[in-house]
Amino acid sequence: MSFQGWIAAWVAVLAVTMGSESGRQAVALDRSGHESDVLWFERQPTDECWCGTGAAETWQVTASALFLHRRRPAALDLIEDAIDGSSVLNASDFHLGVQPGFEVSMTRRIRGPLAIEARYFGIDQWHAAVTQPTDQGSLLQVNFSAPFGFEAGTDIAASHRSKLHNVEVNGHYRWTDRWTWLAGFRYVELDERLTAELIEADEPFSFQTSTRNRLYGGQLGAQVLLWDAGGRLTVDADGRAGVFGNSAAQHSRYDFGLVTETDRGSTTPVSFLGEIGVSAGYRLSQRWSAQAGYRLMWINQVALATDGVAASDFLFGGGIDAGGATFYHGATVGLQFVR
């Protein structure tokens, strides 16, 4: 089943669970640590009270549209002129830009200051296409681990695709009115593919490199309330980071006339992922609020398609480069519901 299928089924099950518990009440802690009727997910009220219905909410659900920019790959000559060494196709030519995705998180208060959160986000559509003109018949080379030469056609058509999916489950501990600590498990998929082919060449030539990363591990983090005057507007910030085992793999292939060669490699580096963000909420009612924010995320020690070209070893096999790093940033816009 796809990520989207799992998420849809999960949402349906949780919706039924929320409905079955609509009559139940939970309790929260006041500033002294004693149980009170203050809402766990709501802030302390002032003259304009937005503190809910009088019973403590146990569910908080947020659904958002996500617009993430993936940093362009680091400069690296993929194809160059075999005579003078001038660059013909560089990794930095691929501008992946901003693409949309979606994010959903569900937090359930368990008891006192404790809660559990499940979160998913994903983007499939990063894609950049590049066409570079070449002098037909000139001698070019692809910078595999052992460079491979060929005669150019009129152009080189290349494309780069990338996708990212994230699932995590975190436990929350509300330390004070402003600070909440979190710890949990995170799973990340980062997959990429790069292809290139000659246009109108006397001898057809094409190659492709695909990379796969599966990150598993624990993370720690915190959430902090930056602004709440008791009215409709609140501002929060959060950060989380972890060290992950990465099951990384690479598959490369080239076709030259009637000849096809392939290479596969795999490794298990230790990767790092860090994420920070800020979000503002505007209460539309006692249950609903509009949300907008901005997030930054960076991952290192991963296999990237542009790095994989130079690592492709068609002589001895097993080529892979899992020492890459990438960076994402962008906006989120959505709605939050508490019950």
Image (tube, helix red, strand yellow):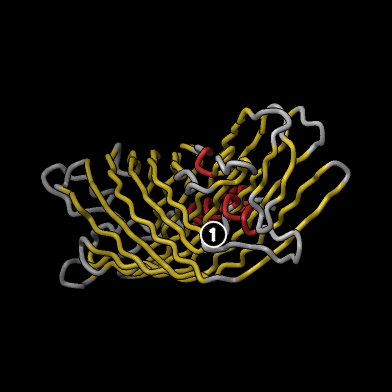
Task: Look at the picture and state if 59 lies above or below 271.
Answer: above
- Return the x and y of residue 86 as percentages of the image width and height: 55, 40
- Return the x and y of residue 196 as percentages of the image width and height: 68, 40
> Residue at image x 20%, y 73%?
33
Give the amino acid at mark 1. Answer: Val
Secondary structure category for the residue under label 1: strand
Q: Is residue 103 left or right of residue 125?
A: left
Q: Please tell me how crowded label 1 is: few (under 14), some (14-19), or many (20+) other residues with Cα within 10 Å.
A: many
Q: Which residue is mark 1?
A: 188
- Return the x and y of residue 161 as percentages of the image width and height: 60, 42
* Extreme residue toward the front, this view: 83
Q: Is residue 207 left or right of residue 52?
A: right
Task: Look at the picture and state if 179 lies above or below 306.
Answer: below
Residue 67 sits in quarter? top left
* Extreme residue toward the left, this view: 47
Q: Is residue 283 left or right of residue 134?
A: left
Task: Look at the picture and state if 57 lies above or below 150.
Answer: below
* Extreme residue toward the right, this view: 258
Closest to the observer: 151 or 204? 151
